[in-house]
Image: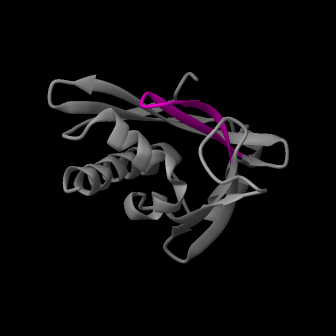
Amino acid sequence: MTPDLEVSRDIAASPAVVFAALTDVTRMGEWSPETHAAEWAEGSTGAEVGAVFTGHNRNGDNEWTTEAVVVECVENERFVFDCRVGDFVFASWGYGIEATDQGCRVTEYWQDHRPDSVKAMSVEISGVEDRVAHNEAGMAETLARLATAVEQS
């Protein structure tokens, strides 16, 4: 993945604790300011390549649902998923985890696959005019909330 955006944060928790939290998509609403809920779908029950989950998103009065498929899952190191509509992948999201002396450094990645022709429709659905700035702020908040959750456990 060649991200359009990445945000990192040092977290005082082991890579295993962070990986377990990130790959439990049912907890995504605890840290994401946009995805308020998620659940495994299509018979998937956990994080593995090919597993599918549904994310329920909100931005102000705008609400929408996305389908995601896990495309990379390396225990305690990487978790990457593609958001799609049918076979059209419109974004890739991922997390990299690197061990540090105090715990780990977590990097959240985002890659935009939307062609210009669908970006206006995306704004109508989400209400987000500047997706890069919005995601950068959201990623920083996500990692801060994740740190709070796993550092206290």
Where does the image place residue 16, in percent across and percent down from the top left? Answer: 36, 37
> Along the horizontal axis of the image, is 132 left or right of 141?
right
Depicted 61 relative to depicted 122: above or below: below
> Along the horizontal axis of the image, is 84 left or right of 72?
right
Where does the image place residue 110, in percent across and percent down from the top left? Answer: 52, 37
User: Colour scheme used in the picture?
Assistant: one colour
Depicted 132 relative to depicted 26: above or below: above
In this view, the residue in front, 33 or 45, is 45
Q: Give the residues in magenta.
A: 68-83
Where does the image place residue 106, in percent across and percent down from the top left? Answer: 34, 34
Q: Main secondary structure of the magenta part?
A: strand
Residue at x 58%, y 23% (from the top left corner): 1
Q: Which corner quadrant of the image does residue 58 belong to?
A: bottom right
Residue at x 23%, y 56% (from the top left corner): 153
In this view, the residue in front, 82 or 110, is 82
Where does the image place residue 87, in percent across and percent down from the top left? Answer: 84, 42
Residue at x 48%, y 42% (from the top left corner): 132
Q: Which corner quadrant of the image does residue 7 belong to?
A: top left
